[in-house]
Image: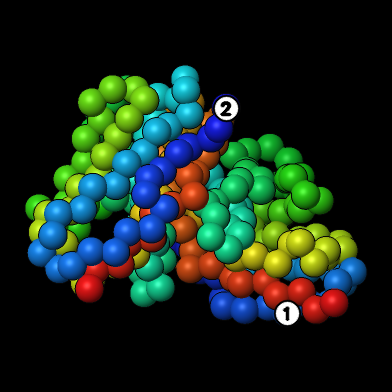
Amino acid sequence: DAGVIQSPRHEVTEMGQEVTLRCKPISGHNSLFWYRQTMMRGLELLIYFNNNVPIDDSGMPEDRFSAKMPNASFSTLKIQPSEPRDSAVYFCASSEGQGRNTEAFFGQGTRLTVV
Amino acid sequence: AQSVTQPDIHITVSEGASLELRCNYSYGATPYLFWYVQSPGQGLQLLLKYFSGDTLVQGIKGFEAEFKRSQSSFNLRKPSVHWSDAAEYFCAVGAPGSSYKLIFGSGTRLLVRP
């Protein structure tokens, strides 16, 4: 398996524009996570899906952020409108399921810069 | 609330020297504990994890970690560091029952002198 695939790797956009980040989890994994990494706040869990259903979105910072998982092999994280403070590295991760014996596999991340 | 503290922002060791990265957690019971490594421009890779049982956990790449309940610590060790170990290391804690919600420490950047 190619692992968790994220696109794009880098995104530069102007303030106010819509940004869509994409993630393809590992085949057979039924849990998917979106994380954000910044210098100030470190790694933060934004949202967690299980079997394509959002289970916990308490980490989503504002209504400008939304995430979807239309099927088991694809998820998006959308920011509309984007702001400079959204600049960060966004990671997608997937795992086989809940519980103690799961391991989250991370993608390489999308580095977002909002100017 | 759960929290994780990695007191060392940077650590520099010579190649071949031993390594210990510190991690302290705050949680009311025994949490699930993890160490991840992040190489530049890459995602995070799991080194090892502790759920229960033997408090000394072996991981990949020659790393090990020891859970010490009395000290609320889960320090990562390696007897002999290689130049390829230079990376950022993250300790994380998960609550049993909701282990998906990992709380990460702020990370320790390891530099290796030739």
Q: Is the residue A39 above or below the residue B39 in the image?
A: below
CA separation in Å, label 1 and label 2: 35 Å
Q: Is residue B78 above or below residue B111?
A: above
Q: Nearer the viewer, residue A47 or B112?
A: B112
**Position of residue A97 measured from the top left corner of the image (x, y, whole percent):** 44, 26
Question: Which residue is disc 2 drawn over?
Answer: A1
Residue underneath mark 1: B12
Q: Nearer the viewer, mark 1 or mark 2?
A: 2
Evaluate whether label 1 is on the same chain as label 2: no
Q: Is residue B36 above or below residue B111?
A: above
- Quarter of the image with the N terminus of chain B is bottom left
Category of crowding for the residue at label 1, using alpha-carbon neighbours closer than 10 angstroms: few (below 14), some (14–19), many (at least 20) = few
Q: Residue at x 55, y 55 (%)?
A: B42
Count of marks, rendered view:
2
Residue B9 x %, y %:
57, 78
Q: Is residue B60 left or right of residue B74?
A: right
Q: Nearer the viewer, residue A5 or B13?
A: A5
Q: Chain of mark 2?
A: A
Is residue B75 found left or right of B17 in the rendered image? Answer: left
Location of residue A71 in the rendering, given as x and y in whole percent from the top left corner: 28, 22
Q: Nearer the viewer, residue A4 or A93?
A: A4
- Kind of residue at disc 1: Thr
> What residue lies at 17% left-to-right and 45% top-to-bottom?
A66
